[in-house]
Amino acid sequence: MSTIFSKIIRGEIPCHKIAEDDRFLAFLDVRPVKPGHTLVIPKQEVDYLFDLDDELLGGIMVFARPIAKAIGQVVPCAKVGVTVVGLEVRHAHVHLIPINGISDMNFALARAEDPEKLADMAAKIRALL
């Protein structure tokens, strides 16, 4: 069964794209925990992050690194936190979330964001890549 992320990869569902290559895609979460909250996914549909082959598992972090640095330049924060939950969508993914403290990683804070604000944030992050 195709996940919502696979539909985004195929362009069936729009997203606020941050970066893409032949193996990975990064885009803003439409229900961000904090502004700048970005999802990084492999294009290969695999449910569990630790079921990715070694090349994809290591590659996802290498792909995420410049994105995290750009997020940190756009969104004032102490760090860009990284988390893997993997329950909400059965497609391996990493969350990059600007944080000032551990409480900022609380997914109960997630709220739908205005599409214009997301588009503006995506443009600012992309400009630094």
Image: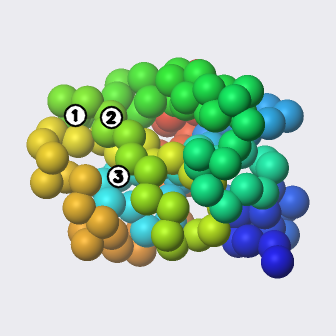
* 39 versus 75 height, above or below: below
Pointer 2 with pointer 3, Cβ within 8 A: no
Query: Could you tell me which secondary element the residue under label 1 belongs to?
Result: loop
Give amino acid for label 3.
Answer: Pro
Determine the CA span between mark 3 and mark 1. 11 Å
For disc 1, the marked residue is: 77
Answer few, some or many: residues within 10 Å of disc 3's Cα (few below 14, many 20 plus, some between 14 and 19). many
Picture quarter containing residue 129? top right
The spot of residue 127 in percent (x, y) is 57, 27
- The extreme bottom residue here reads 1
**Mark 2 belongs to which amino acid?**
Val
Q: Categorize mark 2 by other alpha carbons within 10 Å: few (<14), some (14-19), many (20+).
A: many
> Which one is earlier in the sequence, the residue at label 2 or at label 3?
3
Query: Given this view, does label 2 or label 1 mark the residue nearer the observer?
Result: 2
- Residue 107 left/right relative to 112: left
Q: How many marks?
A: 3
**Relative side of 55 to 10, left or right:** left
| Side of 42 relative to 95 (left or right) | right
Identify the secondary structure beneath mark 3: loop
Q: Few, some or many C-alpha atoms within 10 Å of disc 1 (few <14, some 14-19, many ≥20)?
A: some
SS type, badge 2: strand
Q: Which residue is mark 3?
A: 35
Which residue does the numbered mark 2 point to in the structure image? 80
Q: CA distance from mark 2 to mark 1?
A: 7 Å
Q: Position of residue 18 (x, y in %)?
A: 62, 40
Q: In this picture, is 24 found above or below 69?
A: below
Residue at 22 percent across and 34 percent down: it is: 77
Q: Residue at x 85, y 34 (%)?
A: 22
What type is the residue that disc 1 sits on?
Answer: Cys
